[in-house]
Image (cartoon, helix red, strand yellow):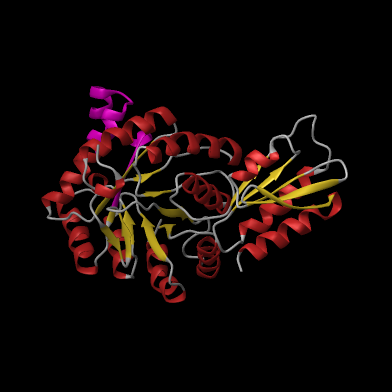
């Protein structure tokens, strides 16, 4: 099985995808690409929340032509999402797109593929081959059914088309809404291809269910060293996608961000802990350095859990404890716990 450190390096301008123990975060816009003012604002918002690649839907000539203006208004790396029409791919490339997502087998004549490949070579634009369980070739479905094998065989066909044209700046995705099937497809792909893998659970669902499904599937792959770039696809705000991406990657040491440990609470809880957890979470969301903070309900688990945190608090009946590196440094009145915790965090950075 080829892990992310062993995949081929593919460059999206100056951004390396593959061949490293790093996973690139991406998402997709919701506004029409031709709505330039709105799309640029959305791109900047997504980048501020952690997106390193932003994908645009290119549905027609006007969308493709808008790329040039959009690129003049942002430095964020952009991907053109194109289906069937090779002319839109050519227009997107000519207008400065950084990467395209297209299936070579779906754009018609071999000559059309050759034109797209030549344009990509000329402008240094990589291609993501996006295989989706819902649109597999009929003969593959007949032979293999809706299986991981069918998905990988489909990807092999598309890859071969590009390789026959001498093109290898390829990234591959194999998406399904079925978590188990997606895991199987990527495990097989990691044995089959040298190219970077874009991982994701497609149509994962609304925020809560989608994050759980994505964490189950993508977490398994990340644990096995698979995945060079990812998107968590939610039927909700794109900023929630990005927050979920960063949180998931941080669990595997692939993204540096503050970590909050919080007690699940029980009958021993003797103070109003929930508002403090919310405020600390909001504070840490924009914290510039990696730090682990524990908010605990009582002194039973507090010292033990706080020992694994840089800074922590544990509440009591009338007062609480502040821990630093697992050691009690002071007691404070219960109503001052949050302020004392924030003070300790800010002093920690000095």
Task: Identify which residue, 56 or 15, lies in the foreground.
Answer: 15
Q: Position of residue 53 (x, y in %)?
A: 42, 59
Task: Identify which residue, 90 or 2, lies in the foreground.
Answer: 2
Q: Position of residue 269 (x, y in %)?
A: 80, 35
Residue drawn at x 32%, y 33% as measured from the top left? 185
Residue drawn at x 68%, y 41% as measured from the top left? 303
Left or right: 62 as drawn, with respect to 339: left
Left or right: 305 as drawn, with respect to 150: right
Among the 4 quarters of the image, the one containing residue 199: top left
The region drawn magenta spans: 128-154
Magenta part, dominant SS: helix
Residue drawn at x 50%, y 63% as measured from the top left? 47
Q: Position of residue 252 (x, y in %)?
A: 45, 44
- The reply to whether residue 110 is in sight is yes
Asked if residue 55 is positioned above or below residue 270 in the image, the reply reads below
Left or right: 191 as drawn, with respect to 77: left
Task: Identify which residue, 182 or 263, lies in the foreground.
Answer: 263
Instruction: Give the farthest residue toward the bottom.
Output: 72
Residue drawn at x 19%, y 64% as measured from the top left? 121
Residue 145 inside the magenta-drawn segment = yes
- The reply to whether residue 136 is in sight is no
Task: Identify which residue, 102 or 21, lies in the foreground.
Answer: 21
Q: Position of residue 259 (x, y in %)?
A: 58, 50
Residue 328 inside the magenta-drawn segment = no
């Amino acid at each position: 099985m080829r892990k992310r450190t062993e995949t081929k390096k593919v460059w999206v301008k100056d951004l390396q995808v593959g061949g490293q123990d790093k996973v690139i975060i991406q998402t997709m816009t919701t506004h029409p690409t031709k709505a330039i003012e709105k799309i640029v604002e959305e791109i900047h918002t997504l980048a501020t929340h952690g997106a390193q690649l932003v994908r645009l839907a290119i549905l027609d000539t006007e969308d493709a032509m808008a790329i040039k203006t959009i690129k003049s208004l942002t430095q964020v790396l952009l991907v053109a999402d194109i289906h069937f029409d090779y002319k839109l791919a050519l227009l997107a490339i000519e207008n400065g797109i950084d990467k395209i997502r297209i299936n070579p087998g779906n754009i018609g004549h071999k000559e059309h593929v050759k034109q797209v490949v030549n344009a990509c070579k000329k402008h240094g634009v990589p291609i993501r081959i996006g295989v989706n369980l819902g649109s597999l070739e009929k003969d593959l479905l007949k032979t293999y059914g809706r299986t991981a094998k069918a998905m990988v065989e489909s990807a092999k066909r598309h890859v071969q088309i590009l390789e026959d044209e001498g093109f290898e700046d390829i990234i591959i995705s194999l998406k399904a809404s079925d978590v188990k099937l997606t895991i199987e497809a990527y495990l097989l792909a990691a044995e089959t291809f040298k190219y970077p893998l874009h991982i994701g659970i497609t149509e994962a669902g609304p925020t809560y269910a989608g994050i759980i499904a994505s964490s189950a599937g993508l977490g398994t792959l990340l644990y096995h060293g698979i995945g060079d770039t990812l998107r968590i696809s939610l039927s909700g705000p794109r900023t929630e996608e990005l927050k979920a991406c960063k949180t998931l990657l941080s669990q595997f040491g692939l993204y540096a961000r503050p970590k909050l440990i919080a007690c699940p609470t029980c009958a021993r809880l003797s103070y109003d802990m929930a508002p403090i957890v919310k405020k600390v979470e909001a504070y840490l969301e924009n914290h510039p350095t990696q730090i682990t903070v524990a908010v605990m309900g009582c002194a039973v688990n507090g010292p033990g859990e706080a020992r694994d945190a840089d800074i922590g608090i544990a509440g009591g009946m009338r007062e609480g404890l502040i821990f630093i590196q697992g050691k009690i440094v002071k007691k404070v009145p219960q109503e001052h716990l949050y302020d004392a915790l924030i003070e300790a965090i800010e002093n920690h950075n000095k």
